[in-house]
Amino acid sequence: MSPHAEMPTTLAFVESPVQLLNVLEWAYARGLGPDGTPDPDRAPGAEEVPGARAGVGNSAGTGGGSQAGVRNSAGPSGSSGARSGNSAGMRGSSGAGTGDSAGMRGRSGAGAVSGLVLVVLAPNDPMTRGQLRRMAELARGDGHVVRWEEARGGTAAPFRTVGGLSRLLRGAGRVVMGDPFSRYVQLLLTITKASELVVVDDGTATMEFVGQLARGERLVRWHRKGGRPGPRDLVFAPVSSSARRRLTPTARRHVEVFSAMPIEDAPKDVRLTENTFAWTRERFGPPSVTKGADMVGTSLVETGVVDEERYLEAVHRLAGTHGVTRYFAHRRESTEKLHRLHARTGLEIVRPELPLELIARRGPIGRTILSFPSTVVHTLPIALAGTGVRVTVCDIDPAWLTTGASPRAQGFLSGVTGTARDVHRLASVSMA
């Protein structure tokens, strides 16, 4: 960027596809055009027109995207991005790749930049990278600028990333973030002078973040709460404390939480804005609905909360009881676990190329969607409102938890289920 380039009014940091989706939802709800000013056709209160808009991509909004996420058709530009290594019964893109080159792209070009700039702090996980690339295409289709940062590409990457973003951070009037627990984001918050900070949903973690902020606690993910801080936690503690202070509203700094989650104990003066998935509902669907049932996977095994054997058995029993034929894998689920799950259940394993809210909205999707406690029990009923699809959530039995699970885990997972609206609730699966 040239020294005389215009600074962005809004700088957004995302590390996952869902975070990027929710930044787009926030921008749409705010009625922001690509230059950061209110879009006269989408200013708050403007009438929403159903159907797809130009620039969204292949079959988006048509409802005819058959087998979305199954035969690599979920990508907005129609490219498969497929990689070798998928076993029989497992379909979809592995998402492996190097990502977009660093730099700014979009309708504003690589010169003067204003409005919303989306900065992707790229993770190493191939599935996440693949979904992020496809979400970045949708953002560019809406005219937003996307900057891809190889933030984890070696030991020098963090210094290079922070150094390259410092000038943008100091010039931005508003900073939007998807994960306030991220050490990267917390470090970047120490640089910004923005008078407005916005936190968009990063799933159920948003509920925990708001509660911790209200109680003045240190920011720590729910599945790690209760354990002793490690050496890296202690070294990073001053930065984390600084981030928590900056995320506390003052007379000169406004804080907004944009969320589809049920939030009851928000700190004083934090503005809560409801995410109604209006962007998703306008651009995608309505979907064709099949008579069968689909199941949504979870990464509770990978995060060390739930025992793998118990999880596989629960999926097996649920699938048999409810006639499930497809299993939509979470992007963090390990290939080894999915191989085992397919061998035991015979389910078709689908690796979605976009967040599940978009995949489900495009369809086809089962009339019943089964899930364990997770973000989707809150978001899917909103995204699929009026389609006739029923979301069913199965409780986690305390006996499924690992010995290393946080003491907070059972209460948090029960809270996720208990606060979900417009879902059908199942008792935990009996292993007897």
Image (spheres, rainbow, N blue to C red):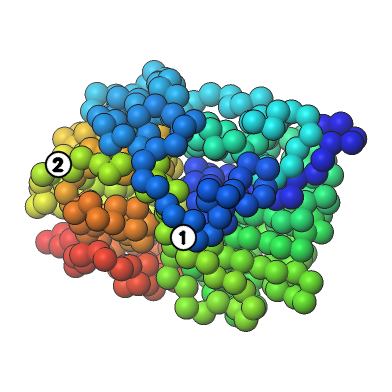
Q: Earlier in the sequence, mark 2 or mark 1?
A: 1
Q: Residue furthest right?
A: 3
Who's the residue at 12% across and 44% down the image? 292
Q: Quadrant of residue 105?
A: top right
Q: Amino acid at mark 2?
A: Thr
| Quadrant location of the N terminus in the rendered image | top right
Relative to 116, 357 lies left or right: left
Q: Which residue is mark 2?
A: 290
Disc on res. 201: none
Q: Quadrant of residue 59?
A: top left
Position of residue 196 relative to residue 122, above or below, is below
- Describe the element under mark 1 as helix, strand or loop: loop
- x and y percentages locating residue 352 in the rendered image: 36, 36
Who's the residue at 75% across and 75% down the image? 250
Relative to 396, 318 lies left or right: left
Who's the residue at 47% across and 78% down the image? 264
Q: Amino acid at mark 1?
A: Asn
Q: Which residue is mark 1?
A: 275
Position of residue 51 relative to residue 100, above or below, is below
Who's the residue at 59% across and 48% down the image? 39
Disc 2 to disc 1: CB gap under 8 Å? no
Q: Nearer the viewer, residue 116 or 133?
A: 116
Q: Nearer the viewer, residue 327 or 175?
A: 175
Q: Nearer the viewer, residue 368 or 89?
A: 368
- x and y percentages locating residue 126 in the rendered image: 50, 31
- x and y percentages locating residue 330 in the rendered image: 38, 44
- x and y percentages locating residue 359 in the rendered image: 34, 40
Position of residue 414 relative to residue 110, above or below, is below
- Describe the element under mark 2 as helix, strand or loop: strand
Q: Is residue 134 visible?
A: no
